[in-house]
Amino acid sequence: MPTVEPVKLSSSVPTTPPNDSLPKYLQEDDMTQERKDFVSSLPIEKGWVANHLHQYQGFWHTTRQLHGVLTCQKHFQAQDSDILLVTNPKSGTTWLKALTFALVNRLDYVDHPENHPLLKNNPHELVPFLEVKLYIENQVPDLTTLTSPRIFSSHLPYVSLPKSVSDSACKLVYLCRNPKDTFVSLWHFTNNLRLKEKGANSLEEAFEKFCRGVSLSGPYWDHVLDYWKASLERPERVLFLKFEELKQEPALHLRRLAEFLGCPFSPEEEASGLVDSILKLCSFDNLSNLEVNKTGILSSGEEYKAFFRRGEVGDWKNHLTSEMIQRMDKITEEKMQASGLKF
């Protein structure tokens, strides 16, 4: 029975001791002077959680995340068998990680479902972020211990993917979500991460930033459109999924995902009900009620439970005013009209 091993970090790139008084996702000073000088040359805005957002290659990143983006671009070497799960933040990332991990590793646990890693580990630990986890601390991770296919996740814009990704035959799975639900989920999530003494971001302030494109890995619309175009140009490499469609017909899209990744369900697996078993294991109700996801904390300081709020379609109706809805719908229509992509 295989075991889940944490990714080891090598010491080939020196590190600076972090400021222990802050959670890791708020730390900004773990950089060489050369990199600090580069980051200081970029456009800057006030952050939603961390103090700053920096615009790099047209998209916004926290200081700490940008550090990971630059290190990942320099050092990550993709393999042809790799699977990269990409989302704009708060678009169903946790669910996609769970589904893909369970799908790819299904033969290892079919006879002993009680030993499944998802029952004892948060999906974000089983499928690590490239730029937010593996390369975030100016370290080069040792990925040689990972079995094939390696599964990683990312919020990276298409333009910022490491060159080795485009040079390889690795598969990209992109999950998008209606921008109104994405915004509301992001607003809730970032307020949960803010230090208490800083207070919450108002809905109006956050909405204004999101509409201007100033959000983590934003502009949202550009992020989505670049992967949509890539999926049309290279359908054998990029699978484009919608959160709403996945919620409506999960079995259909799980089978699509399996076909795309080259591991379709066999007639015997279909007859045994394995599709439904995976969907049940990875459901919001099941994952959110596991003890590990109620009490666990990521190494970067975020509580696991912060990743499980509602997981529903249409929650924006409970938060946005009619003026906000009209404004975001207008932006979405203007951005998407020539692409053929609709929500």
Image (cartoon, helix red, strand yellow):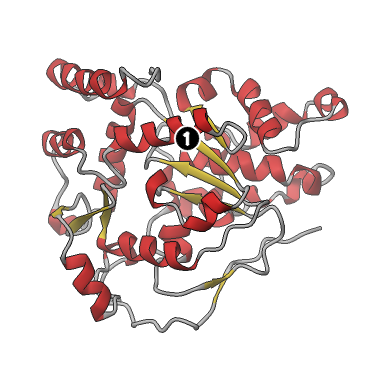
Residue at 40 percent across and 20 percent down: it is 341
Image position, residue 199 (x, y; %): 14, 51
294 or 328: nearer the viewer: 328
Residue 21 at least partly seen: no
Residue 248 at least partly seen: yes
As drawn, 333 above or below 28: above
For label 1, the crowd category at 10 Å Cα-Cα, with few meaning under 14, some 14 to 19 and many 20 or more, is some
317 to the left or right of 160: left
Q: What's under tag 1, amino acid-wise?
A: Ala
Image position, residue 227 (x, y; %): 44, 36
Image position, residue 339 (x, y; %): 37, 21
Quadrant housing residue 202: top left
17 or 309: nearer the viewer: 17
Residue at 19 percent across and 73 percent down: it is 37
As drawn, 128 above or below 37: above
Quadrant housing residue 327: top left
